Image: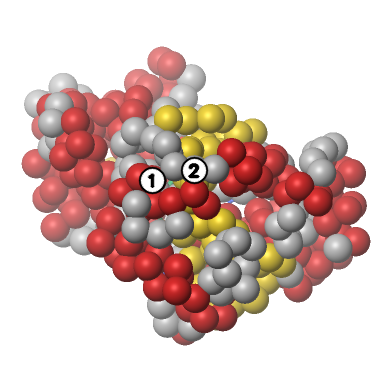
Amino acid sequence: MIFHEQKKAQSEIHYKEEELSITNVGVVGCGLMGSGIAEVAATSGFKVTVREMNSDLLEAGQKRIRKSMDRAVEKEKLTPEERDAAWECLTFVTALEDIAHCDIIIEAIVESLELKNALFSELDGLCSPDTIFASNTSSLTITDMAANARADRFVGLHFFNPVPVMKLVEVVRTIATSEETYDRAFEFAKALGKVPIAAKDNSGFVVNLLLVPYMLDAIRQLERGVASVQDIDTGMSLGCGYPMGPFMLCDFVGIDTLYKISEIMFDEYREERYAPPPLLKRVVAMNRYGRKTGKGFYDWSGETPVPLPL
Ligand code: CAA
Ligand code: NAD
């Protein structure tokens, strides 16, 4: 825990460890988000156990974390010693039982209520009743998951992509989340060096309620022939100072994930602005999932992303 103490001092994070009482952190899913969450928890000094479906996916996630940590060293955000200490905090497993000892388990698997509920129901049978369950869902309600597993110890912890860079975490409580669980989850987000905000348990919480229709509207603009991918992206970056335009953001989030989010939010609100545009469906059907698979609205195989014909 020496490394943990150092990090706390460095980042001036103040929390009462006895109140937080979280030492072991479980992360389920080591894709884009799970790898980032595991990295941030490990560099904050927590003991982290990461679970993936099989050894190939686990190895891919492991490599993603290592690459990101190495980049942090290159950028002098971490010393090599800190990186090595953080790496030592990570354990990679494929058996769900091997994560059961954790004080908090953060789920970051694909955006499917059925799969998330199957996972939480299995975890509920394996973990101590004290373990906090947290979901990183983008668009499902926490209530839909918590209703089937320890509702009083269930929260939403919604991180943003890329997790090592984005400071925000939305902390979500349902009407059944206990005060103690919520406070511990909120303090835990702070202990990761993040800025937590309280969000109501509605589909899309605070940020995605605004951000998702923005991305979908950009696709609708393209469908209507208003401008090209490149020009819409340049417009929003240079005209509004956004760090990247909406199509690059779609590729960044994952187009398969955006499609699932859009379906879930449309199902919830039945409002046109959340409906998946047909072009989004077509791009997913072509397995163009964005940066993570090399092609989305852009081709990511070269030095710089190149817009693809649509
Ligand atoms: N992992 C770790 N660090 C990363 C990173 C990654 N994947 N990508 C970039 N960085 C770091 C870089 O090391 C760099 O650090 P320094 O400034 O210390 O050098 C910094 O971030 C800036 O990176 P770059 O200079 O390489 O590139 P950039 O200036 O274009 O920034 C970006 C990259 C931070 C991703 C920026 O483009 C950005 O903020 N984009 C918008 C991201 C965003 O909107 N995220 C929210 C997505 S929606 C969501 O997450 C919710 C949901 O449920 C879908
Ligand atoms: P991803 O497709 O990159 O990763 C999901 C990973 O979960 C895959 O590697 C898959 O093998 C693994 N997985 C599936 N079922 C599993 C199980 N039962 N046990 C262990 N691993 C399992 O997806 P992602 O972008 O990391 O999204 C994960 C979650 O985070 C989703 O709920 C998504 O909505 C949410 N989210 C995504 C973003 C984003 O920008 N991509 C941002 C915030 C939240």
Q: Position of residue 114 (x, y in %)?
A: 25, 61
In the shown orientation, is residue 166 left or right of residue 173?
right
Is the CB of the residue bearing disc 1 within 8 angstroms of ligand 2?
A: no
- Could you say which is closer to the camera, residue 212 or residue 201? 201
Residue at x-position 73% and y-position 62%? 23
Circle 2 sits on which residue? 177
Q: Is residue 117 above or below residue 166?
A: below
Q: Which disc, if any, is residue 107?
A: none
Q: Position of residue 80 (x, y in %)?
A: 82, 63
Q: Quadrant of residue 219?
A: top left
* Colour approach in the figure: secondary structure
User: Could you tell me the amino acid type at mark 1?
Assistant: Ile
- What quarter of the picture does the C terminus occupy? top left
- Nearer to us in this view, 135 or 308: 135
Q: Is residue 124 above or below residue 41?
A: below
Residue 277: quarter of image? top left
Q: Is residue 194 left or right of residue 126?
A: right
Along the line of sight, which residue is nearer the eye, 165 or 171? 171
Q: Amino acid at mark 2?
A: Thr
Disc 1 + disc 2, Cβ < 8 Å = yes
Mark identifier at residue 142: 1
Q: Quadrant of ligand 1?
A: top right
Q: Is residue 134 visible from the viewing direction of this image?
A: no
The percent position of residue 228, horizontal first and vertical second, equals: 22, 30
